[in-house]
Amino acid sequence: MIATKSTAKKTTRKAAAKPVKPRGNISPEEIQPLIMAAREAYTVQDPGITFDAWRAEEVMAAVGRPGLTACDHNHFCDLMGHFKTAAGKDDEALTWYLKGSTDSARQIAWSIANTLTAHLTLAHSTVDALTASTHPRKLKRQLEARESIRDHSEGPLSFDYLLSIVRDKTRRPNLTLDSDLASALADRCTAGQLTQIRFTLVNRISEREGRGTATDRNRSQVTESAKASRSPDVVTPRF
C-alpha cells in the first residue's frame, strides 16, 4: 500500500472586526454649516493641531460625542453655539444656545458640570500628569491653557464662582447646589437659565485659559512672545 499524507484541515482566519463608530441621526445638511462654523472658530483659536482633531475635541467638549457624525439633531444648536463662542461671536452664540434651550435641561446641566470639571482638572494637573495622559497633538495647547490659569491672579474658576453665576441668572441669592452638580442645576434652573449660565461659564473659562473671545480676550496672551513663553520647552523646566 502506498502511504498517503494526511492533510490537516485548514481553518480560515477571520479578520478582527473593526470597531463600529457610533452614528447619530444628524443629517448631512446639518453637518455642513457646523463644519463651516467650526472652521471659522478654528482659524480664530489657532490651536496648533489639525482641524479634524480640534473639531473632534470640541464636539466631545460641547455635547459628549466623539465627532459630528455621532451627534443627533438635538445637538445642532448647542454645537453652533459652541463654535460661535469659540469664534468670538457672542451674540450669535447666545442666539443658538437659546434656540436649543428647549432640549433636555439635564443635557445642558451635564455640559455645565463637565465644563467646570475639565477646567479644574486642568488647573490642578501637574506637567508630568498632563504629559502622560494627553495626546502629543493636544499637549502644547493644554500646557498653554494651564499656564494661563496659573498666571492669573485669581487662579482657576471655582464651584463658588459658578454658584455666583447661577444665583445671578436665576435671581435667587440664596440658591444652593450640592455635590451632584448636574442634577442640582437641572432641578433648580430652567433650560433657558441653564443656557445663559453655560454661555457665561464657557466665556469666563476661555478668558481664564488664555483663549477668550474676539471682543474681550486678553490680547497679550496671543502674541508670539507669549506663545513662545508657554511652549512645552519653556514651561516644563519651571516646574
Image (tube, helix red, strand yellow):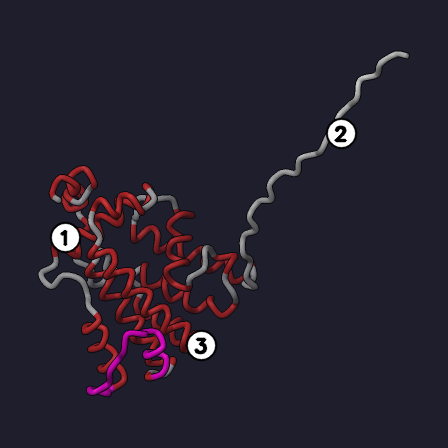
Of the residues tagged 1 and 2, which is closer to the observer? 2
Q: Which of marks 2 and 1 precedes in the sequence? A: 2
Q: Which residue is at a point 22% across and 66% down the rendered structure image?
A: 204
- The residue that label 2 is drawn on is 9
Q: Amino acid at mark 1?
A: Ser
Q: Which of marks 3 and 2 precedes in the sequence? A: 2
Is 94 or 199 nearer to us in this picture? 199
User: Would residue 70 be found to the left or right of residue 157 on screen?
Assistant: right
- The residue that label 1 is drawn on is 220
- The residue that label 3 is drawn on is 104
Horizontal and vertical percent for residue 16? 60, 41
Residues at circles 1 and 2 in contact by the CB criterion of under 8 Å: no
User: Magenta segment range?
Assistant: 171-187
Of the residues tagged 2 and 3, which is closer to the observer? 2
User: Would residue 238 be found to the left or right of residue 76 on screen?
Assistant: left
Q: Is residue 5 above or below residue 133?
A: above
**Separation of residues labelled 1 and 2 (CA atoms):** 71 Å
**Where is residue 205, by image quadrant?**
bottom left
At label 2, counting other C-alpha atoms closer than 10 Å, the crowd grade (few under 14, some 14-19, many 20 or more) is: few
Horizontal and vertical percent for residue 187? 36, 83
